[in-house]
Image: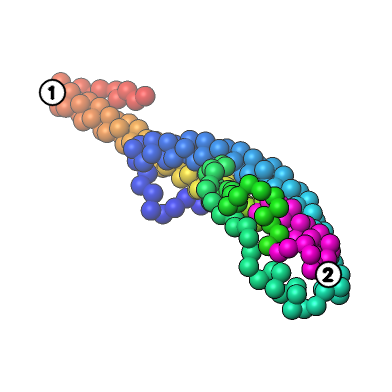
Amino acid sequence: MASTQVNPTRMELTRQKKKLVTATKGHKLLKDKRDELMRQFLDLVRENMALRQKVEAGIQAANKNFVIAKAGMSEETLHTALMAPKQEVYLETSSKNVMSVDIPVFEYKTRTADENDIYSYGFAFTSGDLDDAVKSLADILPDMLKLAETEKACQLMASEIEKTRRRVNALEHVIIPQAQENIKYITMKLDENERSTQIRLMKVKDMMLEEAHHYKEKRTGYPVEVETE
């Protein structure tokens, strides 16, 4: 049913038609955007699952090496070896726009380029398992940052997909049908008004013709046949 607030005028009919055209174009664009977002979202989800499995496997291996190292070393020696880190990591954040979604990008830099700076202790009183644990954690760092970046991107894209889906549904089930119903209602009212106007004009014409014939009868004194269409 058309909205009762719509005025059945030709100006309003033109406005509703323009609104329908705009809503139809917007609906198509938003559907295309939603489909592309879904495609990229699924790719990110698959990448996220692979990264999570890799990171979890790396952390599990590092924990295993730490447990073995702790079993072969005293707790004081282990804490002393890891007390003062030698290497430093600087994290830089930026963003990139993907389908109107600002996705974070993480980049890191180390204080020095020497790979051996990850070991903050001497090798004389520590076990090789501790070296393996530290090395495995250092190797998994880029994947951990990439995993954090991918998970945040998935969250942002999922939120944007939900917003786009709601807009598509609003256009498809509310705005477009309402505009179509308004156009139908206004067209029907305008047609009714046009028919009523034609009927009134025909009646006025008949009345004028009848008055003209009566006037002729009075002037001539003879009856005049009234012609009707």
Mark 2 packing: few (<14 Cα in 10 Å), some, or many (20+)?
A: many
Task: Give 164 or 90, whichever is nearer the viewer.
Answer: 90
Which amino acid lies under the numbered mark 1 shown in the image of this protein?
Answer: Arg
Per the rendered image, the range of residues in magenta is 121-145
User: Dot 2 corresponds to which residue?
Assistant: 69
Q: Earlier in the sequence, mark 1 or mark 2?
A: 2
User: Dot 1 corresponds to which residue?
Assistant: 219
Quick check: 143 left or right of 186?
A: right
Quick check: 149 left or right of 206?
A: right
Which amino acid lies under the numbered mark 2 shown in the image of this protein?
Answer: Ala
The C terminus - image quarter: top left
Taking the image as drawn, is residue 166 in sight? no
132 in the magenta segment: yes
What distance separates the C-alpha of mark 1 from that of mark 2?
132 Å
Q: Is residue 175 above or below residue 52?
A: above
Q: Is residue 212 above or below residue 125?
A: above
Tell me residue 71's x, y (percent). 86, 75
The local secondary structure at tag 1 comes to helix
Task: Name the residue rendered at 51%, 52% in the picture.
Answer: 1
Taking the image as drawn, is residue 78 in sight? yes
Task: Name the residue rendered at 63%, 57% in the picture.
Answer: 87
Camera-near label (1 vs 2) is: 2
